[in-house]
Amino acid sequence: MQFASRVACRKCSASKPAVEADGDERTCVICMEKLANAALLHGEDMHTCTCLECGNDLLKAGTPCPMCRAPIERVMKIYI
């Protein structure tokens, strides 16, 4: 599977595919079923890698961002 583009976090330099080459949106890295439609905010940066439900579960549990391990301060829904 090839990826069309990659996004990188300015703070941690994590680099992950933004969108698959065939145009499909990414799935949640936690449940691997739903669309990754949540932004995990930490400081001035954010990662969009989970669905809203999993993102909120991570926040409530005090689990750090799965991309960079920074503490999650807020979860926001992304309208794609």
Image (cartoon, rainbow, N blue to C red):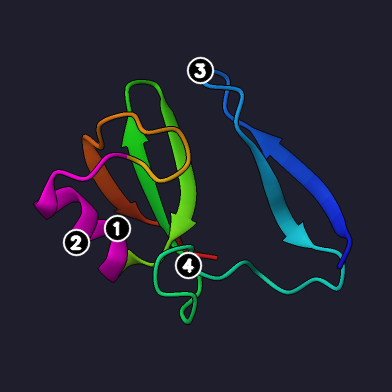
Residue segment shown in magenta: 53-64
Report the side of 72 relative to 36 (left or right): left
Q: Which residue is mark 4?
A: 28
The three-letter code of the residue at mark 1 reads Gly
Q: Which residue is mark 2?
A: 57
The three-letter code of the residue at mark 3 reads Lys
Q: CA distance from mark 4 to mark 3?
A: 22 Å
- As drawn, the label of residue 11 is 3
Using a 10 Å C-alpha cutoff, classify the residue at mark 4 as few (fewer than 14 neighbours), some (14 to 19) or many (20 or more): many
Label 1, secondary structure: give it. helix
The three-letter code of the residue at mark 2 reads Asp
Q: Is residue 9 above or below residue 62?
A: above
Q: Residue at 62% of width from left, 66% of height from top?
A: 26
Q: How many marks?
A: 4
Report the side of 36 relative to 63 (left or right): right
In the rendered image, which quarter is residue 58 located in?
bottom left
Verify whether residue 62 appears in magenta: yes
Instruction: Name the foreground residue: 42 vs 80.
Output: 42
Using a 10 Å C-alpha cutoff, classify the residue at mark 3 as few (fewer than 14 neighbours), some (14 to 19) or many (20 or more): few
Label 2, secondary structure: give it. helix
Q: Which residue is mark 1?
A: 55
Q: Are marks 3 and 1 in contact (CB under 8 Å)?
A: no
Quadrant of the drawing holding the C terminus: bottom right
Who comes first in sequence, dot 4 or dot 1?
Answer: 4
Who comes first in sequence, dot 3 or dot 1?
Answer: 3
Quadrant of the drawing holding the N terminus: bottom right
Instruction: Name the foreground residue: 74 vs 58.
Output: 58
Q: CA distance from mark 1 to mark 2?
A: 5 Å
